[in-house]
Each structure stands twice: as structure tokens, then as C-alpha cells.
Amino acid sequence: MNAATLYGLCSAALVGLGLFGAIVHPQPLRKILAFNLLGGGVFLQFGVIARRGAAAGMGGDPVPQAMVITGIVVAFSATALAVTLLLRLYQVSGSATLSIETQSSSESDGGGR
Amino acid sequence: MTAAMVLDVGLALLVVAVAVWIVAAGSAFAAVVGFVSFGLLLALAWARLAAVDVALTEAAIGSGVTGALLMTAASRLRPTESRSAGERPGAFLHVVAAVLAVLVSAGLAALVLIPASPAPSLAPAAAVHLPELDVLNPVTAVLMAYRAVDTLLEKIVLLLALIGVWSLAPDRFWGGAPGLWPRSRPDGELTLLARLLPPIGIVVGIYILWVGAIAPGGAFQGGAILAAMWLLIMIAGLRPVPEIHRQWLRLVLVVGPAVFLTVGFAGFFLPNGFLSYPAQFTKPLIIVIEVVLTLSIAAILGLLVAGPPERERQR
Amino acid sequence: MRVLFDSFTVLAVSAGAVFFLAGTVGLLRFPDSLSRLHALTKADNLGLGLVVLGLLPQATGPLVALKLITVWLLAQLAGAIVTQLVARAVRRENQEA
């Protein structure tokens, strides 16, 4: 087994962990974190493909590498937008939950600001 | 088993262990701290996969800038944590999610273990025109020349995300300054750091941008370092957070994408199509575009961390 | 000469690794935040310092050596200030409790 295969298995585990966390965590911030974990796993998968495509005197295929750099920046933009939405939800409703029952109850006990 | 193999196995296990910690940690703040270390470990993994450009980006943006953003959010949302503890889904959903996650992981693992042969690669195609471009770092060449349209669209995504963040502000704060309050005493340690570090950090940021033509580095990594220096100065209170209606600020935000787009459209008339550079000016054009892009990237990243305006516009 | 340089590198980097190991054990085992910070600074200052010192003979030129030393100095600066900030936060929390 070479390094690329090893990190490939690692990336597969990361995708699974991220998916699990994004589904079971009730807190939206934890869902965002888990989603970033999933993204990290997918990016690492690209890295494995790039490493295996090493040719022409390069350590890895530069095309997937460039795509991952773009991807990391776009993932950051999406995270920033999601976090701001969440903070705004907290500001408006006094709670940061996606559950409909809890949200309506917190509105009725005057959680809004 | 060689020493390098031991290092790789240890690193891969550590990455997965920290990922488990992020999912299982008791508090959101602990999970965010785990996420920052996860990003740094992942950067090491990228370096082991011979992708140093990506390692730098992951460390600077994936771990550093994202970490700063999430840490602020976690401390602001701390009061909501105890309430959501009662909302954990039942055992049934846990089992379904676990089965789904294992299936996806197993599928990906199978794809890794049964590699395509020969491995697909665009490296030879990318290498063909490298001498003409006079850019020795193939990743920079792909970002700035072969797949320039991706890079351009990504700048637009960054700008759109910033507009989205700003538009979440209450109406009365529109045009005001983001809520990044100075948190340190004027004679405190943070102020000292904000005086000592930026002169070095700005030089390092520019160096990383410049060296991107021949070695790992480039506009994103350099821009992230510059953004970190700007945030440090603002958090220490040495310079105020700019109000978002400022003309100069908006100019800095759009100058990178605008120059990129202008050069792109000029490609229709001079060389042979959108985003193609005239042969004799390729290198200078790439440098000009990268310099203005770095400026815009630094400003956008900093303002995305600073968040929407939270103070009324001063008149 | 080469052998001398190489054995110096192995020795210094190993010594640095020992400090990192001790710092990590302290970080995991010490009872309160302040003593954990104390453990951490040893790894930062001495551990990284020894690793950098050990790598200096392997540097390909004076510029690379300068970069290595800069890395150590910057880690020192950031480490010292972050430690102060964490310690201050700990003291504030203790006073409130």
C-alpha cells in the first residue's frame, strides 16, 4: 500500500464522519463543521487522484490541485454565509435551532430581540 | 515498513481521530478548536501528497481564516447550546445515518482500492505550454491560464458571498461598520502583537504571492496572510473597521475581478478568445492580474470574517 | 565533515522531539490551564528551537537558514503573546467563579 492509497482511505473515512455528523447533530453550527469535514474528505480524494496522476516530471497532476485550491476558497465563502445566516437567526428569534417546535415555543416566550 | 510509511500511517490515523473528536465533542467551541488542528494536520497530509500549493491554502484559509470565523460564531452562540441538547434525534435516525455514512465511506474506499489503470492525468497536457507561459509553477499556470475561467468565477463567488453576508444586516445598520469590536486594552499583549507582526506578515504575504510563479504559493495564500494581518490590526483596535459604504473599500473589493474580466474580454479582440492572453505579454499580464487579485482577496476574506455591519453609519 | 553535520542534526532534532513529547504529555496530564500552558511553552521554545538548530547544517544556503530561524522567532513571538492572552482569560474566569 502506498501513501496515496492510505490517504484515499483516510478521505473516505472523513466523508463518512462528516455525513454522519451533519445528519445527527441538532446544532446548526455543528452541522456546518461536519459539512466542512465532509468537504475536506472530498478535497483529499482529489489530492489522491492528483498524486496518482503524477507525470511529466511533476509530483502530481496540477489540474485537480488547482481545482481544490478554488474549492477551499469557495467552501470558505459558503461557510461564512451560513454562519452569518445562523447568527442572524439567533439575533431575530433568540434561538439557533432548526427544529420547528422549539423555534415557535422560543418565539412565544419572548425570545425575540 | 519504511520510516515515511510510519509517518503517513500515523498522520492518517491522527486526522481521522481529530475528525471523530470534531463530531463527538461536547461543546461547539471544543469542536471548533478541533477543526483548526484538523486543518493543520490536513495541510501536512497535502504536503505528503506532493501538493504544497494546496497545503498552504488549507493551512491559511481552510484552517486559519475559517477557524477565526467559526470561533467567533461558537462563542456568540454559546447560550443556545444547552437548549439544543434536548433536540438530539432518536436512536433510529442515528442508526440510519451511521449505515448511510458507512455505505458512502465503503464505496469511496472501494474506488480508492481499485484504481483506474492507467491513472487519468492532465499533467502532460499542462506541461506542454509551460515554457511559453514563463510560469514555472504548474498549479499557478493552471489557475491563471488554462482554467482561468474557474478562478474568475470563484472571485465572483467570493464577492457574492460578501454581498450576501452584508445584506443580512438589519436595515438601520446598512452602510455602517462590521461588528468586529476591538477586544484588547490599548497597552495589552494583543496590541503589541498587532504592532510587531504586520510588517513581517505583509512582507511574507507579498513574498508568497511573488514566489507563486516558480514555487508553491500564489494569490490565494498571499491574500489570506494579508487578510490575517488586517484582521489582527482591526481586532487590536489600532485601525477602525471601515464602514461598508466607503468608496475606496468597494473599489478595492472589485478591482481584482474587474481587471481579470477586462483582460478576459480584451482576449476577444486581440488574441483568440475569452481569457486568452496575447503571447508577448503573458507573463506581465498574469503578474498584474495576480497583484490586484491578491488585494481583492485579502479585503474580501477579511470582511467575510468581520461579518455584516452592526453599527449605524456615522454621518 | 558530512557525517559530523548529520549526526549533529539527528541529535538536536531528537532532543527537540523529546521536548515536544514532554510538552504533549504535560498538556494532557497537568491538572489546570496555567500549568498546561507552562508545559506547552517548553515544547514551543526549546523543542522547536532544537529542531531548527538541528536543521541549520542541512540548509542549502544562507537564505534557507534565515527562513528557518525566522520561523522559530515568529513561533516564539506568537507563542509568548497567545500564552499571555490565554492566561489572562483564565485569571478572569477564576475571579468570576
Image: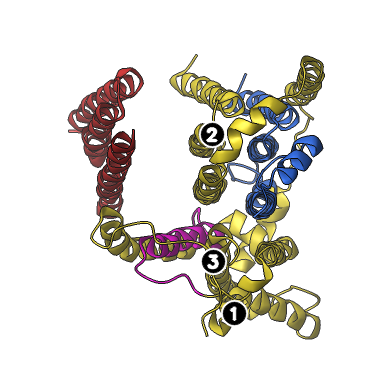
Chain colours: A blue, B yellow, C red
* Residue found 53% across the figure and 39% down from its top: B39
The reply, left or right, for residue B20 in relation to residue B276 is left
Image coords of residue C88 (percent x, y): 28, 43
- Toward which corner of the image does residue B279 lie, by quadrant? bottom right
Q: Earlier in the sequence, mark 1 or mark 3?
A: 3
Check chain identity for marks 3 and 2: say if they share one: yes
Check chain identity for marks 1 and 3: say if they share one: yes
Helix, strand or loop at mark 3 = loop
Disc 2 sits on a residue from what chain? Answer: B
Q: Is residue B278 visible?
A: no
Q: Disc 2 marks which amino acid?
A: Ala
Q: Which residues are magenta?
A: B213-242
Magenta span dominant secondary structure: helix
Q: Is residue B211 above or below residue A82?
A: below
Q: Can you tell which mark lies on residue B45?
A: 2
* Residue found 32% across the figure and 19% down from its top: C25
Q: Is residue B314 visible?
A: yes
Q: Disc 1 marks which amino acid?
A: His
Q: Count the marks.
A: 3
The residue labelled by disc 3 is: B178
Helix, strand or loop at mark 2 = helix
Q: Is residue A74 above or below residue B176?
A: above
Mark 3 crowdedness (10 Å alpha carbons): few <14, some 14-19, many ≥20: many
Marks 1 and 3 sit apart, C-alpha to C-alpha, by 11 Å
Q: Earlier in the sequence, mark 3 or mark 2?
A: 2
Image coords of residue B40 (percent x, y): 49, 38
Q: Nearer the viewer, residue B232 or B146?
A: B232
The residue labelled by disc 1 is: B245
Marks 3 and 2 sit apart, C-alpha to C-alpha, by 35 Å
Q: Disc 3 marks which amino acid?
A: Pro
Disc 1 sits on a residue from what chain? Answer: B
Helix, strand or loop at mark 1 = loop
